[in-house]
Image (spheres, rainbow, N blue to C red):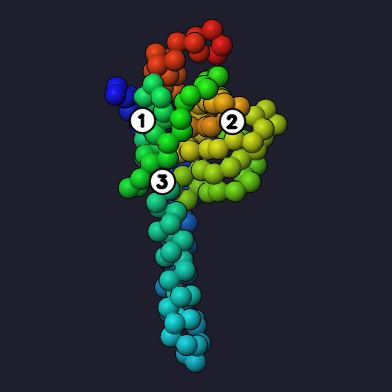
Amino acid sequence: MIATVHRAPWCRALVVTTTLSVLILLGVAWALFDALPAQLPWRARVALQSLPLVVLAISMLFVVRRYELTHDALRIQRLGWSTVIPLHGLQRAWADPRALRALRLCGNGGLFSISGLYWNRSLGRFRAFANDPARAVVLEVAGRKVVVTPEQPADFLADLRRFHPQLEAST
């Protein structure tokens, strides 16, 4: 199976947000070692002290590393796993740097990625797997919308059209 790989670079805002969030979470974990009452059961102390580190570890698993595009699927490579978006029923695809000006319904808005379920007036509900809103590409697949942010949106769209020639007329 032929695949093209597209990097998913981070924008400056994601770098700043992630750095500050990591520092805050590590600081909270450190502060909890002294702040929790000594009479608290040890299991409760460990659970509370570990909570910021658990949030950090879980968020890190959802980082968007790259996009692999084939004729039948888009694979969003994460840290140790991937999310697969089948491309059967692909209707449209276009670049839209304003797509991520949206309301987050459920997900992550800047700790290692911008991912989850979002909504805005122009797209309605959509799933985001992003690192840099300025590079947003919208895919409409079987009535659902997905937003990704490859390093070169024009190259990503060209590869997508190569795999799906019917998009030439519709996008």
Q: Which mark is residue 144?
A: 2
Asked if residue 112 shows in the view, the reply is yes
Closer to the eye: label 3 or 2: 2
Mark 1–mark 2 Cα distance, whole angstroms, equals 19 Å
Instruction: Say which residue label 3 marks.
Output: 63
Of circles 3 and 1, which is in front? 1
| Residue 26 position in % (x across, y down) | 42, 65
Look at the numbered discs 3 and 1 and tell me whether their residues touch, using CB distance below 8 Å: no
> Please, what secondary structure does the residue beneath circle 3 have?
loop
What label sits on residue 68 in the rendered view?
Answer: 1
Q: Are marks 3 and 2 in contact (CB under 8 Å)?
A: no
Q: Residue at x 40, y 52 (%)?
A: 60
Q: Secondary structure at mark 1?
A: strand
Seen in the picture, residue 142 relative to 47 is either above or below; the reply is above
Q: Residue 84 location in percent, x, y?
A: 42, 36
Q: Dot 2, crowdedness within 10 Å: few (<14), some or many (≥20)?
A: some
Question: First in sequence: mark 3 or mark 2?
Answer: 3
The amino acid beneath tag 3 is Val
The foreground one among 170 and 52 is 170
